[in-house]
Amino acid sequence: MIVKALPVSEQATVLSSDDLRKMFEFMLLARLLDERQWVVNRQGKAPFVISCQGHEAAQVGSAYALQAGKDWVLPYYRGLGVVLTLGMSPEDVMLGVFARATDPASGGRQMPAHYSSRPLNIISQSSPTGTQVAHAAGVGLAIHIRNSIAREIVDDAIAWVSFGEGTSSQGDVHEAMNLAGTHKLPVLFCCENNSYAISVPQHKQMGVQDVASRAAGYGFPGVVVDGTDPIACYEATKTAVERARRGDGPTLLEFKCQRLTPHSSDDNDRSYRSTEELKEMRLHDPLHRYTKYLKDEGILTDVDEQALRARIKDQVDAATKAAEAAAVPDPATVLRHVFAETND
Ligand SMILES: Cc1ncc(C[n+]2csc(CCOP(=O)(O)OP(=O)(O)O)c2C)c(N)n1
Ligand SMILES: [Mg+2]
């Protein structure tokens, strides 16, 4: 079963104007913090950036439907908007970018953008793409076993996991979905489809148009969602969350996004995307679209937007300054978590 979520203009959303403004704030924060990462990378101060630009609506809209600290969240490396919406601070993020000792994800040991937080139930992925999808099925299985033993739903948390469309062709992802479909595990598989796996376009690595269509092979719904529309992303996720909490099993959500930057700070997308394509994709910037929507609906004014931009810029400046000034990890601990430590 493939379902298409309604576009923003046709949503009968339960979200209040305050919620809609809050989502805008998270999207703007994600964009400005992401842009700052490119600046410090190009200044030679940070090793690597992998952007959420163009994915903000999918990430913020979807994460807004989760319960932070209760649900288990396994974002992939592009998930800056997800972790900010769940409550990671800009400083937490910048500590990872600068690889500082107080980086909450790994104490400065992981690559940037391998997000995790114990209090927020955010579980890190590994650098190999897709490992987090199998981990999410494992989390779902643990919840399912707990409920099966109790013979009732004593734990209605769900596992939410994201990955790209390129990653969706990997074996781990299919095994995870098969396990989740077989046992009706409470897992939301969220594919952020930006049409590219680094330089490889979708049509060169899969024979289907919609990743969501693969869900039929595992016995659960697949939903195609306009990933530039945060309200549609929220609504589709909310429906899937309710289904999983009831014990009815997983859903595959496919958010059709734009990757507005190169894959990462280490490649040049002008070598594999035409000038026309790069220009056209700018027309689908989710932030521009949502700003216009909120203004057309009378939920945001130009003055509100300017004030918010100024406030977020201050937040990003403060986070950058604090993280840059933080201590680097002690070189004597470089082998920690690699080899067992002894006291001699
Ligand atoms: C198992 C594995 N193979 C290859 C890579 C190198 N790699 C990193 S990201 C990436 C592309 C992933 O594309 P997609 O899943 O579409 O996500 P996107 O980055 O486009 O959001 C590749 C091939 C890797 N990290 N792990
Ligand atoms: Mg991709």
Image: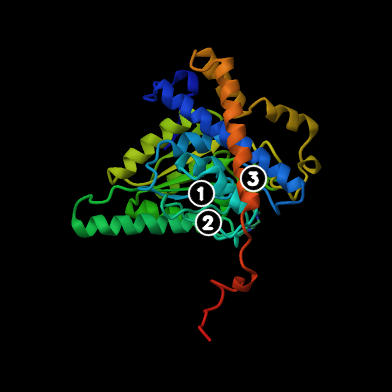
Please identify the quadrant where the N terminus is shown.
top left
Badge 1 element: loop
The label nearer to you, 2 versus 1, is 2
* Depth check, front residue: 5 or 105: 105
**Residue matched to label 3:** 321
Q: In this view, does 1 lie to the left or right of 243?
A: right
**Residue matched to label 2:** 105
Label 2 close to label 3 by CB (< 8 Å): no
* Depth check, front residue: 10 or 3: 10
**Residue matched to label 1:** 75
Q: Is residue 313 left or right of residue 253?
A: right
* Depth check, front residue: 165 or 297: 297
Residue that appears at 47% across and 29% down: 22
> Is residue 223 shown to the viewer in this render?
no
The label nearer to you, 1 versus 3, is 3
Badge 2 element: loop
Q: In this view, does 185 lie to the left or right of 174?
A: left
Q: How crowded is mark 2: few (under 14 residues within 10 Å), some or many (20 or more)?
A: many
Three-letter amino acid code of the residue under disc 3: Lys
Q: Is residue 199 left or right of residue 123?
A: right
> Where in the figure is residue 252, as x and y percent of width and height?
45, 43
Which image quarter: residue 137?
A: bottom left
Q: How crowded is mark 1: few (under 14 residues within 10 Å), some or many (20 or more)?
A: many
Residue that appears at 23% across and 51% down: 154
Three-letter amino acid code of the residue under disc 2: Ala
Q: Residues within 10 Å of mark 3 (few under 14, many from 20)?
A: few
Which image quarter: residue 80?
A: top right
Is residue 293 placed above or below 214 in the rendered structure? above
Is residue 205 placed above or below 300 in the rendered structure? below
First reached walking from the N terminus: tag 2 or tag 1? 1
Mark 3 residue's CB less than 8 Å from ligand 1: no
